[in-house]
Amino acid sequence: MPQTPGRADCDQIELESRPSKRTKHSSMRSIDWRGLARAFVFFWYFSAVTHVLLFFSGATGFLPLRQGFVFSLLWLVPLLLFPNRARPISAAIGVVLGLGALINLGYFSIYGQEFSQSVLFIVFESNPAEASEYVDQYLKWWMFPGLIAFCAGAYRLWRGIRPLAMAPAGRYLTIAVILAGLFLQPTYKVLRKRGLDPAKYLEAIGNRMEPAVPWQFVIGYARYREQLAGMEALREHTERIPPIENLIDQRAGQPGTIVLLIGESTSRLHMSLYGYGRPTTPKLEALRDQLTIFDQVYAARPYTIEALQQILTFADQQNPDLYLTRPSLMSIMKQAGYRTYWITNQQTLTKRNTMLTNFSEQMDEQVYLNHQRSQNSYSFDSNVLEPLQNILKDGAERRFIVVHLLGTHMRYKYRFPPEFAVFRDGSGLPEWASSEHAEMIDEYDNAVRYNDHVVSSVIGSLAAADKASLLVYFSDHGEDVYDTPPHDFIGRNEAKPTPPMYAVPFFLWTSPQWRGEAPGDLAAARSRPYQLSHFIHTWADLTGLRFAGYEPDKSLINPAFREREILVGNPADQKSLLDLRQLLKPPAATRP
Ligand SMILES: [Zn+2]
C-alpha cells in the first residue's frame, strides 16, 4: 500500500525524536530541562520584548513583565502533551503570539504605552479614515528593520526547539506543577476572599493573565463587550431623563468660556496655598490675587465615581439616586446653549469608569487621553493642555469645558515627571514620619507640586486666550497620607473617615472680561463649611443659570447660604452617615 506524503513526514519527526534505540533510554530523562527552557524562552520572547521596552521606558511598572513571564509557562503544556510534535506545535503557537506581539510593539512604538481594552474602545469608536490617518502619520522607516529583527529573533529561538526527551511520568508531573503554579495560588486567594463565585474567579484570573500576549486581546475584547453593554444601558437610561424645566440664563447671549477643572485625590492639607509647610503650590500662590479661595470645602464621598455622581448632578448624600432621574450639570449647560467639551486624562473604559464615560458622552466633544490598562502607569496631566488650547481657538462663542485630571491619584510616583521630584529624603517632615512613610509623603507632595504646575498652566491658557472666562477648580476628594494620628493609614476608607480624605481645594478664577452674576459677598463665603454634593447650586450662581430644583441656600456663594451637616459615609446606609464636622473639632484637652 502506497504511503501518503503526510504520513512519511510524521515518521520523520518520530525518527528525529528518537536518535537511536541505544541512547533512547538514557535520553528519556524524567525532566528535559534544556528542552523546556528553550521552548519557554521562545514563548516568553513574544511578551518579554514589549514588556522590557515598556518597563525601561518607564511606561509601566514591573508587574506586566512578571505576569508575562509567569503565563508564558502555560504554552509548555501542549508541548508536554505531544513531546514529539514540539516543533510544529511551537511554530503554530509562535505565529499567534507573534501577531499579538507585533500589535503590542506597533502600539508601543507609536504611543509609548501598553495596549489595553481602552484602546479597543477607541479603535471601535473612531472611524476607519481617522485610524488610517494615524497609521500614515506614525509609520516610520525604522519600524521595518525593527520588524525584521524581531521576527529573526523569534525564528532563531524557534530553531533551538527540539522534541522534548522526557518520560511520561516526568511530563505529567511537569504539567501538574505548571498548572498548580499558575492557578492554585490565585484560586486559593479568590476563594478565601470572595468565596465560590465563578464570575469573580474568572475576573481575577483574567487580571493576572491580561499582560501576557495574546490574552490582552481575548480578555480585552471580552471586557470591552461587557463594558459596552453596561454603558449602553446607562446611555439609554440617561437619554430618557427629561430636560431641566424653567431654565433661565441670566448670561444669555453673552460670550464666555467656562472651565470646570476637576482634580483627583488632592488634599488641600498638602497644598502650601492652604498653609502646608512644604512649598507644594508655588505657582498657584503666585496667582493668589487672581483666585477666590474657599477653605472649608469637603468632598461628598472619598471615591471618584461616587463623588462625581453627586457633584455633577442633583444627587447628594440624602438623595443619592437623583442622578438617575434628574439632568446633570453637563446636560443643563448644553441646554443653555453652550458648546460642551470633556477632556480627560482618566482611564476611559475600565469597569469603574463607565459612569464617567457616560458623563463625557453627554458633551458635544470628547478628548480621551489615557488609554492605559493600569491606573499605575504614566499619563501626565500636562497632556490636557494641547487639546484645551485647540478648543480655545475653535471660534465657539460660549463654551463649557470639563477637564478631568489624574491629579495625585495613587501610586503617586507615577503622577509627576522627574523634574518635579523636588521633595526628597523626607526633609522638612514631622518627626512621626518614618523613612518608609517619608518616601510616600515625598512622592505625594511631588505629585501635588506637579498638579500645581498643571492647574496654573490651565489658568495660563485661559488667560492667554484673553476672553471672558471663568474657571472652577476642586478635587473630587482628598487623600490621607499618614496625616491622621496615629499616622498609620494611607489612602481613603469610607468606613473609617478622616478629614484629609474629604478636605479638598476649591477656588475660582475669572478673566478681567468675565461679567457673571455678582455672587454676593465672596469674602464672607470663603470659610463656609460646604459639601461638594451641593455643587450644582453653586454652579447655578456662578454661571447665572436658574432652573427647577435650584436652592439658593445650598449655594456656597449665595447670601441665602445655610450651613449644613457635612455627611460622610455610604448613603445606601442612611443610618451610618456621620457629620464630618464632629471630627474637625479640636480634640478635648488631655493635658493636666
Ligand atoms: Zn478620585
Image (cartoon, rainbow, N blue to C red):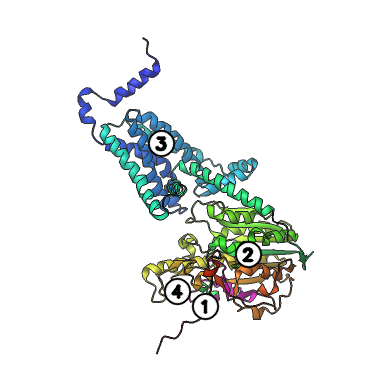
Question: What residue is shown with label 1?
Answer: 582
Quadrant of the rendering where the N terminus is positioned:
top left
Q: CA distance from mark 2 to mark 3?
A: 56 Å
Q: Position of residue 42 (x, y in %)?
A: 37, 38
| Observer-nearest of 326 and 516 | 326
Question: What residue is shown with label 2?
Answer: 315
Q: Which mark is residue 154?
A: 3
Q: Label 3: few (<14), some or many (≥20) within 10 Å?
A: many
Kind of residue sitting beneath label 1 = Gln
Instruction: Say what secondary structure mark 1 lies in.
Output: helix
State whether residue 461 appears in this view.
no
Question: Mark 4 or mark 2, which has the lower sequence index?
Answer: 2
Quarter of the image holding residue 398? bottom right
Kind of residue sitting beneath label 3 = Ala
In the depicted structure, whether residue 91 falls above or below residue 436 = above
Q: Furthest residue to the top?
A: 1
Asked whether, in this view, residue 67 is left or right of residue 310, the answer is left
Which numbered disc, 1 or 3, marks the residue closer to the eye?
1
Q: CA distance from mark 4 to mark 1?
A: 15 Å
* Numbered range of the magenta stretch: 274-301
Q: Which mark is residue 484?
A: 4
Which numbered disc, 3 or 4, marks the residue closer to the eye?
4
Q: CA distance from mark 3 to mark 4?
A: 54 Å
Instruction: Say what secondary structure mark 2 lies in.
Output: loop
| Observer-nearest of 189 and 103 | 189
